[in-house]
Image: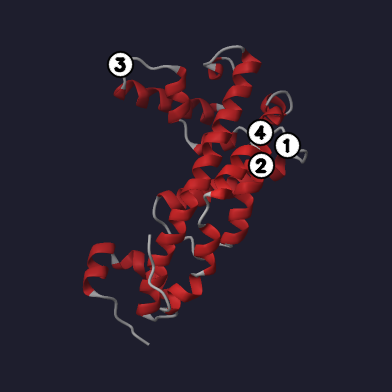
């Protein structure tokens, strides 16, 4: 067992961050090093599917709310709670700092995935899900709560991937299935197109070889 990481790795990537991988590797620094690189490799394969899911979700919810309220800035008429209103105001201010003229499309693009997922929470059931947002998922027939739980978990995965956090400990095969299941509720056509380009299954299957040193990681 090798208990020492390369000095440059501990310096450049930070030992506190790397300690999580050392623990996962039961103290073997070489295994931890390879696990770290594989974590980046597998995270990279999730960016594309998560990209498709986030944009499809955002556009489906936005378009449904535009139709319902009859205006592109639907948040001015919708019964958002205090937190939701604050997120919209923050997105608008951010746009106004960067742009000479802010449009509703700019605000929509600035709003976080967490905001869109929150519109499916239980507090919004009567105001959003029942009258409006169920129509944004034309291929879903289940309860709102199950969809919300799936999206909450995927939002956490998305944030971990985008902020370079460990994801190797998650049930990634189930996460991957969940991405495409929810994407299929929104757009089977987009789900099919994304899957045709998806490298995740091959990278997941190679985990043992990469961590064991049989093949080098690549990203």
Which residue is located at x 54 percent, y 20 percent?
75
Q: Earlier in the sequence, mark 1 or mark 4?
A: 4
The quadrant of the image that shows the N terminus is bottom left
SS class, disc 1 = loop
- Pointer 1 with pointer 2, Cβ within 8 A: yes
Real-space CA distance between mark 4 and mark 3, rounded to the nearest whole angstrom: 35 Å
* 129 and 54: which is toward the camera: 54
Q: Position of residue 40 (x, y in %)?
A: 40, 60
Which residue is located at x 52 percent, y 31 percent?
83
Q: Earlier in the sequence, mark 1 or mark 2?
A: 1
Q: Position of residue 24 (x, y in %)?
A: 46, 73
Q: Earlier in the sequence, mark 1 or mark 3?
A: 3
Determine whether 219 is above or below 159 in the image: below
SS class, disc 2 = helix
Q: Which image quarter: residue 126?
A: top right
Q: Position of residue 48 (x, y in %)?
A: 48, 47
Real-space CA distance between mark 1 and mark 4, rounded to the nearest whole angstrom: 23 Å
For residue 37, side relative to residue 191 (left or right): left
- Pointer 1 with pointer 3, Cβ within 8 A: no
Q: Position of residue 163 (x, y in %)?
A: 40, 51
Real-space CA distance between mark 2 and mark 3, rounded to the nearest whole angstrom: 37 Å
The quadrant of the image that shows the C terminus is bottom left
Q: Earlier in the sequence, mark 2 or mark 3?
A: 3
Q: What residue did someone put label 2 on?
A: 184
Q: What residue did someone put label 4 on?
A: 123
Q: What residue did someone put label 1 on?
A: 139
Which numbered marker is on residue 100? 3
């Amino acid at each position: 067992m090798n208990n020492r990481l390369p000095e440059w790795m501990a310096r450049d990537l930070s030992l506190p961050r790397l300690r999580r991988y050392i623990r996962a590797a039961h103290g073997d620094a070489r295994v931890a090093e390879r696990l770290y690189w594989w974590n980046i490799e597998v995270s990279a394969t999730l960016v594309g599917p998560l990209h498709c899911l986030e944009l499809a979700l955002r556009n489906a919810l936005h378009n449904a709310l535009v139709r319902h309220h009859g205006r592109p800035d639907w948040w001015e008429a919708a019964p958002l709670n205090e937190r939701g209103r604050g997120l919209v105001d923050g997105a608008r201010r951010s746009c106004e700092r960067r742009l000479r003229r802010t449009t509703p499309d700019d605000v929509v693009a600035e709003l976080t995935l967490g905001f869109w997922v929150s519109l499916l929470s239980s507090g919004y059931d009567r105001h959003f899900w029942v009258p409006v947002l169920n129509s944004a998922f034309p291929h879903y027939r289940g309860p709102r709560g199950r969809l919300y739980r799936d999206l909450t978990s995927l939002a956490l995965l998305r944030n971990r991937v985008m902020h370079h956090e460990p994801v190797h400990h998650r049930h990634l095969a189930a996460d991957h299935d969940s991405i495409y299941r929810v994407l299929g509720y929104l757009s089977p056509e987009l789900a099919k197109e994304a899957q045709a380009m998806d490298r995740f299954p091959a990278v997941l299957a190679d985990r043992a070889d990469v961590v064991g040193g049989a093949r080098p990681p690549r990203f």
